[in-house]
Image (cartoon, grey):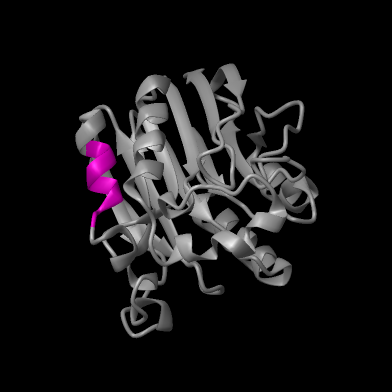
Amino acid sequence: MRLLTYNIAYGTGSPDAAHQRLWTIHRYLKTPRSHLDRIIKFIDESKADIVGLVEVDTGSARTNYLNQVETIANHLKHFHLSGTKYGAKNLLGNKVPILNRQGNAVLTREKLPPGNFHYFPRGFKKLIIEVDIKGIRFFLVHLALQKSVRKKQLKHLIKLVKSDGPVIIAGDFNTFSGPEEIIELEEELDLINPNAENLSTYPSWEPRKQLDFILCSREIKILDFTVPDVRYSDHLPLILDFEL
């Protein structure tokens, strides 16, 4: 099977250098469809069986009310599961326009069973998507920017995930202090990071940080792992080929 995980930055594209971020900040308020089309083409050509997308717009004014999850899934002919990031409806993120349509999504070639939406007790971004894929418990996450909050989120994730059976945890961990931040998670859950060379994933135009991960149980046989040089977002995607 092939798993692709990608923080697509709501289809807002990517500057060519850090200094261009300020001059292109308007893309977060209004973004052209062309960025999403390039992302769709890349995902389609990857032939992924499972796609974990972080930072997808589910239909705000920014995308002219286009639901990116449905658009990508329809093109790929995949089934999909998505949710917004902020937990309870009374929280700030669910009240602010554009923010209230920001989410994460799981897409699969075969029909998905009903998934579970969990929420971190701390942090602004709270969503954890869990879905069973052929006997594998798959979790998609997007951790906090603040290190102290990430630490609490990782402890919560350990308690949530801990069980028998194969597990894959993927997404944007925002480990700005380095992959050492997730050592406890790996040890407690006995997970392997297939990114053996510690390839960086952020920023896409000059990768210096390993923020994005796919972590696997030992029952999962790793066949191949790549970080494609695809600059359609400020993050690089990850692709894992595996079998049980």
Against 194, is 125 above or below? below
Q: Pick out the residue farthest to the top.
A: 223
State the residue at coordinates (61%, 28%). Answer: 227
Foreground residue, 5 or 43?
Answer: 43
- Magenta region: 66-73
Q: Residue 238 appears at what percent x and percent y?
A: 56, 32
State the residue at coordinates (54%, 35%). Answer: 237
State the residue at coordinates (65%, 38%). Answer: 190
Residue 114 in view: no
Residue 116 in view: yes
Q: Residue 23 appears at what percent x and percent y?
A: 60, 62
Against 196, is 18 above or below? below
Against 115, is 243 above or below? above
Q: Is residue 53 left or right of residue 113?
A: right
Q: Residue 101 appears at what percent x and percent y?
A: 32, 66
Q: Residue 98 appears at what percent x and percent y?
A: 36, 70
